[in-house]
Image: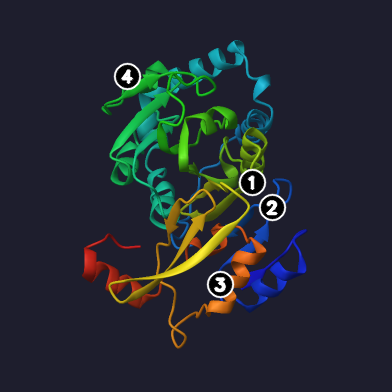
Amino acid sequence: MSITDRGQGGSFRRLAARLPWPGWQVRAAGGHDGGVIRELARVVPAPTGRPVRAEAAQGQERARRLAMRPGTWDRQEAAAMRAGFDAAAADWEVSRGGYRRPVLADALARGGPFRPGRAVEIASGTGLLTPLIAQVWPEVIAVDLSGGMLARSAVGGRIQADAARLPLAGGCAAAVVIGDGPLFAAEAARVMAAGAVLVWSNALGEGAPFFVPAGILAEAMAAATGRPWDAVCSQAHWGSWAVLRRLSHRGAACMRTHDGGRERVTLTDTDHRTQPSCYPVRRPADYLQMPGPLISWVAAHRLPSSLWTTLPPTAADRDRAEAASGARSW
């Protein structure tokens, strides 16, 4: 286990050092006002033979520029991107489709919890990832700049549009999902409802043309909204993913509840919305105990909420969850 602290106070360091989080790296995401990035250990192995994209470096420079300086995007650049994807649409699923699903599948399996509602998929392309998204959010609005890509998609609810100017109402989405596409942070934030998440997936990780590190994503979203964002991220197959959440307020309170004999931590933001954890808090002899004084300490020191929203599941947790609710494998 490795826990690093960049710029946070001593109380955060002392707490982090006492928490048994195997396989996690927790670091302050410097530059976006106190948000925390949690790196989860890889679960989906990377096979050999990862493709190399010659255009990756140039594409990443553009992706970072658009995330941090969206005003540099213009109609000429949009038209060039549209033409490129129109030309690639015919053999897209054959040449690039097979390795995209495992990365997003891992993000949706381990990046929760997620609120119910509608998802907006940016850069939906031919619809390769849409069925995965629909397993979590049954209503998906699939948006792509390329008409050629959308013409080869069988997904309902397709919209050809520029992600910098979405023809959607504000606050309409419980999730914005971007699989190898550009982030226009202010527009993504505009359509996100309270408690919504930004799900980011790069099929080739650092070798993907649209790859942007989680810290820069969080910084872009913070700059667009004026509030810090937390992120949980990991690697899967050949790619990488991140799930980002806005902190509705710097303060958060913790409380304990019991569900079917299992103890859970629930975070209540100061605007009175609650976000239950995916996994149970371990019993003292099993994994982790949160005594009452520690809960009070957490609330008093206003730690970022993502620090407590999820804990890695044990094998016993998986067995209990599947037996109790028939849930899919973690």
Vertically, is 91 above or below 288?
above
Counting residues from the start of the chain, the first of labels 2 and 1 encountered is 2
In front: label 2 or label 3: 3
Amino acid residing under circle 3: Ile
The disc, 1 or 3, on the residue closer to the chain's N-terminal end is 1
Of label 2 and label 4, which has the lower sequence position? 2
Q: Which residue bears the numbered disc 3? A: 295
Amino acid on which disc 2 is placed: Gly
Residue 315, image x, y percentages: 36, 75
- Under circle 4, the secondary element is helix
Q: Residue at x 32, y 70 (%)?
A: 318
Cα separation, mark 1 vs mark 3, equals: 22 Å
Is residue 27 or residue 48 the one in the foreground? 27
Verify CB contact (< 8 Å) between mark 2 and mark 1: yes
Q: Mark 3 vs mark 4: which is more N-terminal?
A: 4
Q: Is residue 41 visible?
A: no
Residue at 35%, 42% in the rendered image: 133
Q: Is residue 188 above or below residue 330?
A: above
Q: Quadrant of the N terminus?
A: bottom right
Report the disc number at residue 151: 4
